[in-house]
Image (cartoon, grey):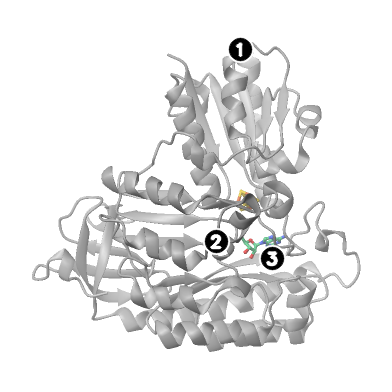
Amino acid sequence: MKRYHVTTFGCQMNEHDSERMKGMLESLGYAEADAAQDADVILFNTCSIREKADSKFIAHLGHAKRLKREDPERIIGVGGCWAQSVKDEVFARFPFVDVAFGPGQVHKLAEFLTTDSLTAQGFFEFEGFTGHLPRKRARDFQAWVQISAGCNMACSYCIVPSTRGREVSRPLEELVEEVRALAAEGVKEVTLLGQNVNSWGRSLAARGARARSFAELLHAVDAIEGIDRIRYTSPHPSDMKEDVVVAHAELASLCEHIHLPLQAGSSRVLKAMRRTYTRERYLDRVALIREHVPDAAITTDIIVGFPGETEEDFAQTLEICEQVGYDGAFTFVFSPRRGTEAGAITENLVAHEVKVQRMQRLVEVVQRRATERAQRLVGRELEVLVEGTSRTDPARLRGRSRHNKAVNFSGLASPGDLVAVQITGASSQTLTGELSLLASASAAAR
Ligand code: 5AD
Ligand code: SF4
């Protein structure tokens, strides 16, 4: 039996796409190999969001090159955003690559493998959702659901609109059917994925169907028996409407966590980033969340060192972090990307040392506020979905609260169980606790 190996870089959408690649390969009769050197087909699902993502992957390709030299019959495939961003250049730069494909052409991999193609091939036109392919899930009780592909925003720093194309939504009925099938297989938690999830449904009108709202989709998924938890990522603050915020308060399965990417705290920088909201409008969204779902965890993404970012602009980012008190934040140093508007800026660039120093200051504020905010959870009993054993202590268990906090706790439970955990300690990232013996899982406080 032929074997494959997939290495995944980048975001949750890529993790989802890799599960579909695996599912498709298994339906062709391939089996998964534990390591690349044992595989006949070696695949990379790549990311191009920052320069670091590119270089990380290129180091891995060197290994694949050696394996190909050892056995020229091996197939080396490169998919995903990096492949899309360089397209056919892949073959000129890395002649040992046999097949390259973008995020909308994963199915072409099957075509390539089932024909006796002798020449390297590249596939880069959007043709279909990877969400339509068979899947191989990493966990029995959790699943990704691709609700849309592509992005219609034009953030000036971001490569994604050029790698994943214009936004296309999958129809409501199709998604409901998919989640129903997942629930029947024992899935308890679904994460709805899209580049801009809360604009989901709008593009349906362009294809003759009725336009829908993201809140409608949340209601429809919540109504499906067996789904205990709904998550989604990522929303765009401009499209974060009151109906979605209210849904967090109303729908039993919608988790108390909202990832609301800020990117920058100064309206001037936000404008240069083409984020389509101001500092005030963003804070207004936060106020709306705090009003309807006071306990919700709010997390964010922030970029430091965008071209032209002054000390004053940066101080406004710090100020928002102080004010909001995020439960967590992903912080990035601006990385110029090929083909993007901001990547072409040559003036007023922020010096490397300044970027590094700003990053340190930002991380200090983010972590301090996250630690402070996490204290509200100490002493409470939280519902935890068990994922496995703790990474640092095999005698303890690890899971996630509805706030998306990692929880390490003592007690007996199995992966996939929903249990009640008494929280005894909290740091910026992790909670610690003990399994509650008295409470039944369904009675777990939220
Ligand atoms: N440089 C740095 N960070 C970036 N991100 C996207 N593009 C860039 C870039 N060119 C960050 C944004 C986004 C997250 C997924 O990655 O914060 O929300
Ligand atoms: Fe995901 Fe963006 Fe990386 Fe593509 S470039 S894999 S969309 S993070």
Place of residue 75 in the rendered image (x, y in percent of width and height, measured from the top left):
61, 20
**Closest to the observer, 68 or 228:** 228
Q: Residue at x 50, y 22 (%)?
A: 39
* Quadrant of the image occupied by residue 344: bottom right
Q: Secondary structure at mark 3?
A: strand
- Within 8 Å: ligand 1 and the Cβ of disc 3? yes
Q: Is residue 394 left or right of residue 324?
A: left
**Closest to the observer, 109 or 201:** 201
Categorize mark 3 by other alpha carbons within 10 Å: few (<14), some (14-19), many (20+). Answer: some
Where 4 falls versus 319 (above or below)? Answer: above
Q: Residue at x 42, y 62 (%)?
A: 231
Q: Marks 1 and 2, Cα distance to the nearest angstrom?
A: 41 Å
Of the residues tagged 2 and 3, which is closer to the observer?
2
The amino acid at mark 3 is: Val
Q: Residue at x 57, y 61 (%)?
A: 211
Place of residue 168 in the rendered image (x, y in percent of width and height, measured from the top left):
62, 51
The amino acid at mark 2 is: Val
Q: Quadrant of the C terminus?
A: bottom left
Circle nearer the N terminus (2, 3): 2
Place of residue 388 in the rendered image (x, y in percent of width and height, measured from the top left):
28, 51
What residue is shown with label 3? 333
Q: Residue at x 54, y 76 (%)?
A: 241
Which numbered dot is residue 197? 2
Of the residues tagged 1 and 2, which is closer to the observer?
2
The amino acid at mark 1 is: Glu
What residue is shown with label 1? 73
Residue 327 shows up from this direction? no
Q: Is residue 264 left or right of residue 178?
A: right
